[in-house]
Image (cartoon, rainbow, N blue to C red):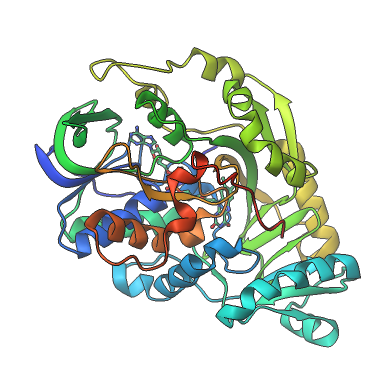
């Protein structure tokens, strides 16, 4: 069920000491490692499974500025710039291509809703715009749908999730970072209140700073430190088609389908408007934090009781650092995809783009998205534990912003001038009375 991910040559020996230890080898962890290594900082990355085993290899591969929450725009603009030069920077193929992205609209009302987002794009002079009629047909041929038009950004693009994070990890390693796989971090040790070391299942690494980039595991990691990080998981299902001749180069999101061309000539396809939030103990713990986002997204999220309730209930909430931690018990989160969502996506896509009608499905998988109450990530120091940093909660759109987030985190850890204002991503917004809310439903 898990998509095949490019291999990364991992290190065998656990260093006794490093300046910085990164917990998690998804796109955020490896990007942070790359930018720290480029600054000459001694860095160790610990991944409990394999590099990009979870969300970072399972996503659609969209690198989009379009439709972003305005708080993320400066960072995604920086990230898009980094993607442009990423193949050269890491001396490998990440699959990045500038092919454009469309949000297809069936009605004038839908189009007006999408158009409203352009007010956020204007101060940054983004190339996002509405396209209709002949221009739309020319830019996105092959559609049988009757579209009122689309929101389109030519400078948005795509990359290959199964290749990008491994390529970045390999480059970080060439620059001196140590990459450890099959190496869960159980927790951190402090000395006089400051971060002093991580304890892994393979031993202890003394360090000055720790970056938690643990994706869907971050809230559990924080809980053992006495920190409350509101974060829930949302199940999103995906399929890969066999190669398709003459299909669209651009990616598009329409009613009940989303597609993106792959380097292998096939397409990554998903429903796009149907995700499952399984009811788990954290659903109750964080219910009031997530109520505002549920009110906005209720049409697209199905709440469902399931087996994960018991699995998560049984997981220890607290553990000592000499005990096996929850992270060693689940090397790779590999949930069952929702077959109905994938079948519906395929049918909806074939109706809108008949070229896809008889294309075989080559593979199906699912991923668990880690969401925050305002759908904006945390990229931040933790004030109460000096030397402890969090980069998580990318809420279903962290692949595109990953390189930018890694760069920002490297700036924060080293105390350099941050590449963008980090204030919107501060951890303290959950406790300082800010009442975090999503600000766009696009
Ligand atoms: C189906 C789907 C479609 C998506 N589509 C897009 C898209 O098109 N564009 C986009 O921008 N984003 C998309 N996303 C979101 C994107 O994939 C994520 O936001 C991004 O990959 C998050 O990266 P990460 O590094 O934070 O987390 P992850 O990739 O989940 O990595 C976290 C890693 O930390 C490891 N870990 C956790 N705890 C520990 C520990 N204690 N010790 C050691 N290792 C640990 C885990 O094993 C894991 O490998 C999508 C997500 C899904 C699931």
Q: Nearer the viewer, residue 425 or 76?
A: 425
Residue 410 visible somewhere in the drawing: yes
Residue 169 visible somewhere in the drawing: no
- Does 372 appear above or below 358? above
**Left or right of 169 in this view: 138:** right
Residue at 83% across, 63% down: 352
- Does 43 appear above or below 160? above
Residue at 32% across, 74% down: 88
Residue at 50% across, 12% down: 314
Q: Nearer the viewer, residue 88 or 22?
A: 22
Residue at 80% across, 44% down: 299
- Give how far across and how far down residue 8 sits, in percent: 29, 50
Q: Nearer the viewer, residue 276 or 426?
A: 426
Q: Residue furthest front?
A: 433
- Does 180 appear above or below 73? above
- Which picture quadrant has residue 386? top left
Quadrant the N terminus occupies: top right
- Give how far across and how far down residue 301 sits, in percent: 73, 40
Quadrant the C terminus occupies: bottom right
- Give how far across and how far down residue 340 sits, in percent: 77, 38
- Give how far across and how far down residue 264 sits, in percent: 53, 63
Q: Nearer the viewer, residue 421 or 236?
A: 421
Q: Residue furthest left?
A: 16
Q: How many marks?
A: 0
């Amino acid at each position: 069920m898990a998509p095949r991910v490019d291999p990364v040559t991992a290190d065998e020996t656990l260093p006794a000491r490093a300046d910085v230890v990164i917990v998690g080898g998804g796109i955020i962890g490896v990007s942070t490692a790359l930018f720290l290594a480029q600054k000459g900082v001694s860095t160790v990355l610990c991944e409990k499974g394999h590099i990009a085993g979870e969300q970072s290899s399972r996503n659609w591969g969209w690198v989009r500025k379009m439709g972003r929450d305005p708080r993320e725009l400066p960072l995604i603009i920086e990230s898009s710039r980094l993607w442009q030069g990423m193949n050269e920077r890491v001396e490998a193929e990440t699959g990045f291509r500038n092919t454009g992205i469309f949000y297809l609209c069936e009605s004038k009302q839908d189009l007006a809703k999408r158009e409203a987002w352009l007010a956020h794009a204007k101060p940054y002079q983004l190339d996002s715009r509405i396209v209709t009629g002949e221009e739309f047909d020319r830019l996105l041929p092959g559609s049988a749908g009757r579209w009122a038009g689309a929101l389109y950004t030519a400078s948005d693009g795509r990359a290959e999730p199964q290749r990008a994070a491994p390529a970045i990890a390999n480059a970080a390693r060439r620059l001196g970072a140590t990459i450890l796989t099959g190496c869960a971090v159980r927790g951190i040790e402090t000395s006089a209140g400051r971060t002093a070391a991580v304890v892994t299942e393979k031993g202890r690494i003394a360090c000055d700073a720790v970056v938690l980039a643990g994706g869907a595991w971050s809230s559990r990691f924080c809980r053992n430190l006495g920190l409350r990080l509101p974060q829930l998981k949302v199940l999103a299902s995906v399929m890969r088609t066999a190669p398709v001749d003459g299909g669209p180069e651009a990616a598009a999101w329409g009613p009940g389908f989303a597609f993106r061309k792959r380097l292998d000539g096939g397409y990554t396809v998903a429903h796009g408007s149907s995700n499952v939030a399984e009811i788990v103990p954290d659903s109750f713990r964080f219910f009031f934090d997530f109520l505002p986002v549920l009110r906005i997204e209720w049409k697209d999220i199905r709440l469902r009781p399931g087996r994960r309730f018991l699995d998560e209930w049984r997981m220890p909430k607290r553990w000592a650092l000499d005990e096996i931690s929850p992270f060693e018990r689940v090397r790779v989160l590999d949930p069952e995809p929702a077959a109905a969502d994938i079948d519906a996506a395929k049918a909806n896509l074939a109706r809108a783009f008949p070229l896809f009608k008889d294309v075989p499905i080559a593979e199906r998988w699912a991923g668990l998205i880690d969401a925050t109450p305002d759908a904006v990530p945390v990229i931040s120091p933790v004030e109460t534990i000096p030397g402890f940093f969090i980069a998580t909660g990318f809420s279903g759109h962290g692949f595109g912003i990953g390189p930018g987030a890694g760069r920002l985190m490297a700036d924060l850890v080293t105390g350099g001038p941050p590449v963008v204002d980090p204030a919107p991503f501060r951890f303290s917004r959950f406790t300082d009375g800010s009442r975090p809310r999503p600000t766009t439903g696009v």
